[in-house]
Each structure stands twice: as C-alpha cells, then as structure tokens.
Amino acid sequence: MSDVRRIAILGLSLIGLCLSTDSAFAFLAYISNEKGNSVSVIDTDKMETIATVKTGQRPRGIKVSPDGKSIFVAVGDDDTIEVIDTKSLNVVGDLPSGPDPEQFTLDPQGKLLYVANENDAMVTIIDVQKRATVGEVSVGIEPEGMAVSPDSKVLVCTSETTSMVHFIDTTSRQIVGNLLVGSRPRFAAFKADGSELWVSSEIGGGLAIIDPATRQLKQTVNFEIPGLRSEAIQPVGINITRDGKLGFVDLGPANRVAVVDGVTHAVLKYLLVGQRVWHGAFTPDEKYLLVANGVSNDVSVIDVASLRVIKSIQVGELPWGVAFAPN
C-alpha cells in the first residue's frame, strides 16, 4: 500500500473517530408535552426529535437529575412525578408529589425535590433517594413558581392568586419572608451567584428584580412590543446565563422571548418564536436556548451569541417544559 493511501485511510479514520466522539456527547433536550402525554427527546446536533416517551396525564414541569440518570416529570392529572431512566427512556418509578403537581425544583445536590401543589396551597418536599415525602409547607393560594438559592438555604415559591413571593428556610421549612409582586407570578429564577431573584408576573405583564438578601423589590421591568396589546404580553418562563449578563423571558401569547440585560435590566431585543411560548432551557454549554411553544407544537432554537432564532423543531402536542442533562 502506498504512503499516500495509508495517509488517506488514517485521515478518514480520524474523521470517523471525531464524528463518533461528537455524537457520543450530543446534548439531548427533553420536552414535556402537556396534551400529548409524552416527553419528546431532541438531539441538538441533529436539531430534530429522535424519540418520544409516553407519560401519564398532563405532563408539565420537567427536570433532569444532577447525575444525568433520571428525568423527573410532573404529571398533574395523575397526582405524581414520574421518573424516566435516561438510558432506556422507560418510566421506572414515581415520586409522591401531592395533588396536582405543576412546577417543581431540585436542590443543587439533587437530594430534595420541592413541588408546588396548586390545588392545596402547599409545597411538598420529597427525598429523591427514599422516594418519600419528608415535609410540607403551607403557602399562598395557587403556588406555581419554584426556585432554590444556589447555596441551598432558601426556597422560593410564588403564589398566583395572592400575587406573592414566599421565602422559605430550607432547614426549618418555615416561611421567613413574603413579598407582594405583580399579578399572577408564574416563575422564579436565581442568578447563579445568588445576587438577584427574577420573578415573572403573567397578568401583571412585568418582571420583578428582587434582592434575595433584603427580600425587597429592586426594580420592575416592563415589556412593550409595537403592534401588540399589553394584555397579550404575559411573562412566564425565565432563563439567565451563568455569568448573569443576559436573561431571556418567555412572553406567552406575545410569541416573543425578551432579551434582558442582566446588569442594567434594559430590554435589549424581542425574538419572534412560535405560538404561546412557555418555558425554556439552555444547552449545557449555553450555545443554544430551546423554548417550548405550546400552541404551534414546536420548539424554537435560539443562538445565544447572535441572539437569533435559527431553527424550529416539531415535538408533541402542547409542549410546556424543557430540560437538559448536565454536561
């Protein structure tokens, strides 16, 4: 065999190895489909749906465990949180969530899961390993948004009907503070350094920027889109980059994602996405943000660096939540 042919074969082998390695580390997104009673699996290298997992009734809140082995899905009409194995994509168990779970959050260690029970004005605390309820906290009417501070010391729960943010000490499991915000607060997110808490108000139409240390409102960000009535702008999901420089706020039936400066809180841009955008998640490398569009049954892919929507991917019926396994 000639040296030229050997070099060519070696080159092709190396290319094949690189492609195989890249494929092995492709990021997978998991999308809960509220009416489809399923979870769609998206390969972000191929930018397409590669699998569908059947779930219980009305899946909404969705998270992946820190070790990447389990997907947790709140199936509200079945009053439980199903556990899906990420390797087999089979439902392998459930967690005792209490009635009508919608949103939930995991502590940073993945040991405890905190669930908002909308119909019972309650937060249920679950030990993930034991698959057992270990506590309950009474909160305001229609609890919804859930977030844990980066240091795991404070749990935040928003109550839609009472338009309030509750601050809960995770050790004593007692409410240690309350803050009134705009009407129907739907989602809460901490900056990675814990310096700010962002809360969206769906009917109020604004974004509350809160100082977690003082539990006081710092600023309210309002959204205005030419040609749209204010009542069509309904902030729900929030995603903040790890460096805290950019925030993305999903504006529901406005069919836009607002890009917010993480320092000045100025609205930088509105990105047109699918119909009735609900929630989103970054790829682990933060190259892309994927957002679920409930009415158009698709996921919009946003390039974070260029702040452009680059792709639409069809998923199941009424997509609601997005989650990624950690890198």
Image (spheres, helix red, strand yellow):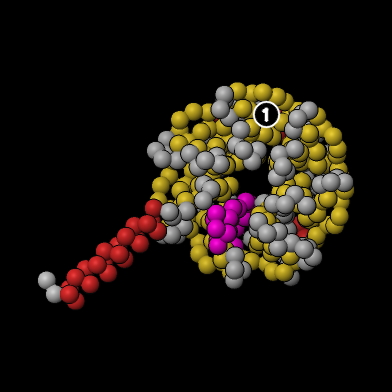
User: Is residue 91 shown to the viewer in this render?
Assistant: yes
Can residue 284 be found in the magenta stretch? yes
The residue labelled by disc 1 is 125
Pinpoint residue 258: horizontal percent, then vertical percent.
69, 63
Badge 1 element? strand
- On screen, residue 182 above or below 71: below
Q: Magenta segment range?
A: 273-290
Pinpoint residue 117: horizontal percent, then vertical percent.
69, 32
Viewed as shown, does residue 98 lie left or right of 233?
Answer: left
Identify the residue at horizontal 64%, vertical 41% (top origin). 108
- On screen, residue 268 above or below 209: below
User: Is residue 36 shown to the viewer in this render?
Assistant: no
Q: Residues within 10 Å of mark 1 (few under 14, many from 20)?
A: many
Identify the residue at horizontal 78%, vertical 45% (top origin). 184
* Residue closest to the eye, 272 or 26: 26
- The three-letter amino acid code for the residue at tag 1 is Ile
Pinpoint residue 169: horizontal percent, then vertical percent.
78, 34
